[in-house]
Amino acid sequence: MIEDARKKQAKRSKEAGFTLTEIMVVVFIIGLLSSVVLFNVLGARTDAQVKTARTNVTALSNALEQYSLDMYDYPTQQQGLDALVNEPDDASGAGTYRRGGYINSVPLDPWGRPFIYKRPGEKSGRAYDLYSLGADGQEGGEDENADIGNWN
């Protein structure tokens, strides 16, 4: 009787664990699911960065238009976008600079670089060009590496 109990207990202990194959299958499935989730999350992040850059270009363009209405001209190349935050020392006396400025601070693009302000504009056909160089930080490019400016 004692021997039967030992045999049953030994049999149960052999059946209690997982086999190496079962563990490997579970690890493979977890890895596969992780890669699918990671791929989708990275794509969404890139889209969000491009949309944020477009939104910032629009907001800065609106601030530049307000500046232009008050000062009768856009900031010079030397004054740059900082003229939207602080009244330039060399601002023409023709207009009236808005107290408190036009924006609180000049944002960086979503990739941590300053927006480029060029006056006169070449790419946009306007008085100024305002753009981000995209994810790669280089002129031109496609998809997330494309320049994002006031011309698109």
Image: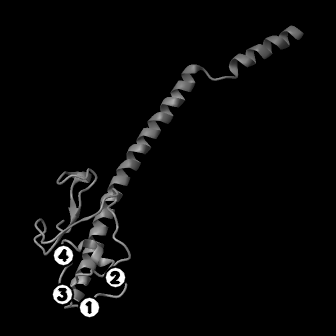
**Residue at x 67%, y 22% (from the top left corner):** 17
Crowd around label 3: few <14 · some 14–19 · many ≥20 (10 Å): some
Kindly indicate the quadrant of the structure image that contains residue 77.
bottom left
- CA separation in Å, label 3 and label 1: 9 Å
**Which of the pair 101/66 is nearer the observer?**
101
Residue under pointer 4: 76
**Badge 1, how many Cα within 10 Å: few under 14, some, many 20+?**
some
Q: Is residue 89 above or below residue 27?
A: below
Q: Could you give the CA–CA distance between mark 2 and mark 4, rounded to whole angstroms?
A: 16 Å
Q: Is residue 135 above or below residue 14?
A: below
Mark 3 near mark 1, Cβ–Cβ under 8 Å?
no
Q: Which of these two is toward me, 90 or 5?
A: 90
Label 3 belongs to which residue? 72
- The residue lying furthest to the top in this view is 3
Residue topped by disc 1: 96
Tell me where residue 94 appears, x and y as whole percent.
19, 91
Q: Amino acid at mark 2?
A: Gly
Ranked by sequence position, the earlier of labels 2 and 1 is 1
Q: Tell whether label 2 touches label 3 (CB within 8 Å).
A: no
Q: Earlier in the sequence, mark 3 or mark 1?
A: 3
